[in-house]
Image (tube, grey):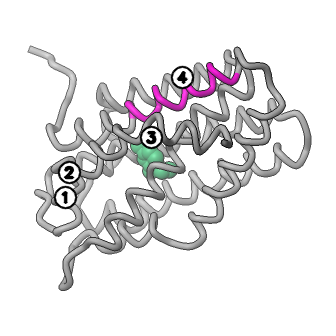
Amino acid sequence: MSWSKATWQTISPIYHQIIEMPFITELMDGNLPLEKFQFYISQDSAYLENFGRALALIAARAYDTENTLAFLQFAENAIIVENALHESYFKEFGVSEKSIIQPACHHYIHYLKSTAALENLEVAMAAVLPCFWIYKEVGDYIYKNQKSGSNPYQAWIDTYAGEEFGEAVKKAIAICDDHAAKTSPIVRAKMTEAFVTASHLEYDFWDAGYRLRSWQTN
Ligand SMILES: Cc1ncc(CO)c(N)n1
C-alpha cells in the first residue's frame, strides 16, 4: 500500500471528527454565526501567508528543480488565495484589516515553519500535506452534502471543491509518496507522525474558530 493510503487510514478518525464538527455542519447548512466565520477568515488569512512561506522554504530545499517548481507553485497559490480573502471575503463579511494571530493559528503556522526549516525534507513535505488533502476532502464533503438554497458561504465552499485545487492536491500526494518510497523507514515513520500532527492542528483550527478561542489577557 502507498504511504499516502496507509497514512490517510491512520488519520481517518480525525477526518471523521472534523466533518462532524459544528463549524463544518453549520457552514454547510449556511447557519454558521457570522462572528465565527469572521474569526476564521481573519485567522486563515494569517495562516495562508505563513503556509505560503513554509511552502517556499520547502521549494528551496527540494532535491530537484521539478519539485522546487511544484512547491513554488503551491506557495504562489497560497498567496493568491490569501489575496482573494482580502479582495472579496474581507469586504463581503466585514472583516477589518490584519488581526492578532490567535493561539490555534499561531501553533499551526509555527509548527509548519519550524518543520519546514529544521526537519528532513520528506518530513516537511508530509507536514504540509494535510493542509491540502484534508481541505480537499472537507471541501468535497460540504459541496456534496450542502442543502439546496442560498448559502452565504457559497463562494468559500466553491474554492475548495474546485477542480484546480484538486489537481494541486493530487500532485502534493504523489510527491509525498515518491519521497516516502525513496527514504528510510525511520524518516518514513517521522513523515507519518508529521501528517498526524498537522491533521490534529487542522481540527484545532476549526475548533478555535467555533469557540472564538483567543489569548486570555485578564
Ligand atoms: C487552516 C487551513 N488549512 C488548510 C488550508 C488550505 O490551504 C487553509 N486555507 N487553512
Real-space CA distance between mark 4 and mark 1, rounded to the nearest whole angstrom: 28 Å
Q: What numbered label is drawn on residue 25?
A: 1
The residue pinned by badge 3 equals: 47
Q: Amino acid at mark 2?
A: Phe
The residue pinned by badge 4 equals: 193
Residue 94, given in percent of the width and then of the height, sits at 22, 61
Q: How many marks?
A: 4
Name which of mark 4 and mark 3 comes first in the sequence: 3
Q: Is residue 208 magenta?
A: no
Frontmost residue, 12 versus 39: 12
Name which of mark 1 and mark 3 comes first in the sequence: 1
Q: Does 203 appear above or below 95?
A: above
Ligand 1 lies under 8 Å from the Cβ of mark 1:
no
Q: Quadrant of the C terminus?
A: top left
Label 4 crowd (10 A; few <14 / some 14-19 / many >=20): some
The residue pinned by badge 2 equals: 23
